[in-house]
Amino acid sequence: MLLRALADMNAVESVAELFEMGLGVESCTQGGGLSLYCHANHQHAPMNGKKIDWAQVTRLKVVQIGGDK
């Protein structure tokens, strides 16, 4: 499951494509008790008003693998 999620993350051009695949950003994947928590990994995250513009995010940082944050 982890390798599949990482492969999906590597294959997309922007994080918005992960949403289209059914993966969220706070918890990029879930299943069998596994959660992969990610944040935008830009010095200045691209913004659309007060929200992150996920279509412009091209780098993610995995901050935790496992259960609750």
Image (cartoon, helix red, strand yellow):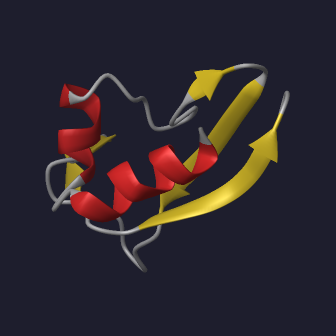
Q: Nearer the viewer, residue 49 or 40?
A: 40
The picture places residue 57, in percent across and down from the top left corner, at 26, 60
> Residue sitting at 16 percent across and 59 percent down?
56
Say if residue 55 shows up in the picture.
yes
6 or 36: nearer the viewer: 6
Is 56 above or below relative to 69? below
Left/right placement of residue 31 relative to residue 54 reads right
Question: Which quadrant holds the N terminus?
Answer: top right
Residue in the picture at 40% in, 74% down: 42
In percent of width and height, residue 69 lies at 83, 35
| Above or below, 14 relative to 35 | below
Relative to 56, 45 lies left or right: right
Q: Is residue 40 left or right of residue 32?
A: left
Residue 40 left/right relative to 14 = right
Of 19 and 52, the residue lying toward us: 19
The answer to whether residue 57 of the structure is visible from this angle is no
Query: Which residue sits at x=85%, y=30%?
Result: 67
Picture coordinates of residue 51, whole percent (x, y): 30, 39
- The residue that appears at 46% across and 69% down in the rendered structure is 41
